[in-house]
Amino acid sequence: MLRMSLYRDEKAATLQEEDEQKMAVMRKAFQMFDTTKSGFIDTLKISTILNTMGQLFDDADLNAIIAENDPEGSGKVNFDGFCRIAGRFLEEEDAEAMQEELKEAFRLYDREGNGYITTATLKEILAALDDKLTSADLDGIIAEIDTDGSGTVDFDEFMEMMTGE
């Protein structure tokens, strides 16, 4: 369990760095549209900002989320409110994108289409993802994942291992 925890800790550090980068992008976008430097932007500008950030969204969803973050209907949100709004769309896309990437990676290694990969193949994947993992680390991770000793890992087990969910 310790080896898997260390692996997840490294993944968490990477995710934190990515979150900081997203926050910097959101702050820059917010500041660009806060032309009066009041610390607030018009809620009408949020769709433009999200488009600028390359985000796709449904107008009805966006309006509902804006309403949650502007309960008085002032037509303005501060940076925190903007982050809560934009973050909903960024998280959705990230989770979906990660699942698709992992599904594609799994499919590439499940060449016969059996719905599983061998633990030997999984070791190769993990070693390629993190060259700091020792053979003992890899064996420990495999032992945690392949609890039934079948020598195989299905997609759900693979997803759980990669995302911790």
Image: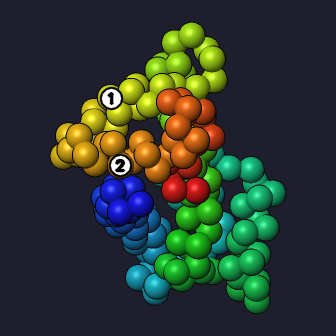
The residue at 42%/42% (across/down) is 142
Identify the residue position indicated by label 2 in the image: 140
C-alpha separation, residue under disc 1 versus residue under disc 2: 14 Å
Instruction: Give the amino acid at mark 2.
Output: Gly
Q: Is the residue 28 above or below the residue 102 in the image?
A: below
The answer to whether any part of residue 28 appears in the image is: no
Q: Residue 124's mark?
A: 1
Mark 1 touching mark 2, by CB under 8 A?
A: no
On the rendered image, what quadrant is the C terminus found in?
A: bottom right
Q: Quadrant of residue 20?
A: bottom left
Q: Which residue type does callout 1 highlight?
A: Glu
Res. 154 image quadrant: top right
Q: Quadrant of residue 85?
A: bottom right
Please state the horizontal and vertical placement of residue 125, each as a whole percent of the image. 36, 31
Q: Secondary structure at mark 2?
A: helix
Q: Residues within 10 Å of mark 2 (few under 14, many from 20)?
A: some
Q: Position of residue 128 (x, y in %)?
A: 28, 33
